[in-house]
Image (cartoon, rainbow, N blue to C red):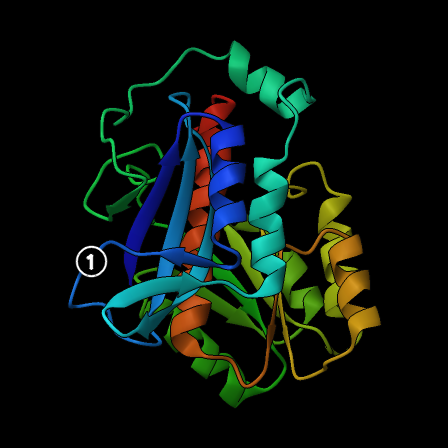
Amino acid sequence: MRDVVYRHDTLTALAEFLRRHDQALPLAADATWSDGEWVLAIFEVGTRGRATAAVGNVSRRADDSFLVFDRRDWERIHDFAATHADDSLNAMLAAAPARRTVDTIPPETRRGDQRGSLFEISVHDARILVVDPDGQTLVALQAAIRASGIEVEGVATAEDALVELATERFEVVVSELELPGISGIALCSRLRDDERLDALPFVIVTAIDNGRVRTEAFGVGADDWLGKPVDGEELGARCVALVRRFRHAKRQFGATP
C-alpha cells in the first residue's frame, strides 16, 4: 500500500483545498497509479505534527488520477480541517515543543517516500486484535491484516477479547458487530469506559447495513465501520492508518508508541 501526503501551512488552507476538490483529491502525475488502488492519504498542517489520515481509492480519468473518499471519511477530514485553534487538543499541541519535520516541500501533494510527522511513524511491532465468531471469516480477516505487515491475534468472543486486552498490548481492535454474549457495540463501550483502553482504535465489521445501528456504534466511540464481505486490501490500509494515527497521538503527549 502506498502513501500520499497533502501538506498545508494552516487549517484554513486545508479547508479551502478540500472545498475546491469535493470528495476527489488530485494525485501527482504518475503513470503507475492503478485504478481502484487503495492509498493512505495523510493530511498535515503546520510544523508541529498536527495530522490525520484516511484511506482513499484511486480513480483514473483520462490522463489524470484522483483519490476518492467515501462520504464518512470525507466528513471526518472536513471535521479535522474545521477544528478551532483554541480547543483543548490543539491548545495542548500548540504548547508542546515543535518537532523536526519535513516542512520545506512546496507542492500540496507529495508521494510516500517523504518523512513528515506521520511518515516517520512505522507500524513495526504493531499488533491488532480481531474478534469474529466465524472461524473461516476470522482466518480471512487475520490474513488480510498480516498482508499489510501488522501482527494479528484472533478470538471468537468479546469475553475472550477482554481477557486478551487485559494482559496483552494491541493498537487496534477489529470486531464483528454480532457476537455471542457481549455485542461488538457493547465491547467498544466497555473499552471506552476503561482508562487504559479508552483511546484504542475500534473498527466494526458486519454484514448489517443499518443506519441506526451504525450511528449507535459511532455514538459509543467506534472509529470505523466496514461492511462484509470485507475488501482485504482496504481493511489492511485502514488498519495501517489507525495504527499510525494512534502512535502519532501518543507521541504528541509524550508517550512511547
Callout 1 amino acid = Ala
Q: Residue 8 vs residue 249: left or right?
A: left
Which corner quadrant of the image does residue 118 belong to?
top left
Task: Say if 154 sits above or below 170 in the image.
Answer: below
- Which residue is pictured at 63% across the width and 35% down the height? 82
Q: Where is residue 136? Give x, y as percent.
A: 50, 89
Q: Residue furthest left?
A: 31
Q: How many marks?
A: 1
Residue 197 sits above or below residue 13 on the image = below
Q: Is residue 36 above or below residue 193?
A: below
Q: Residue placed at 31% from the left, 72% from the top? A: 60
Q: Position of residue 145 (x, y in %)?
A: 40, 68
Quarter of the image with the C terminus is top left
Q: Residues within 10 Å of mark 1 (few under 14, many from 20)?
A: few
Q: Residue at x 36, y 36 (%)?
A: 7
Residue 120 rendering spot, x and y as whole percentages: 28, 37
Is residue 148 toward the left or the right of residue 186 in the image?
left
Left/right of residue 43 with respect to residue 27 in the rendered view:
right
The x, y position of residue 54, in whole percent, is: 47, 54
Query: Would residue 57 be seen by someone viewing this image from the given angle?
Result: yes
Q: Nearer the viewer, residue 164 or 76?
A: 76
Q: Is residue 154 left or right of residue 214?
A: left
Residue ID at (35%, 76%): 36
Q: Residue at label 1?
A: 29
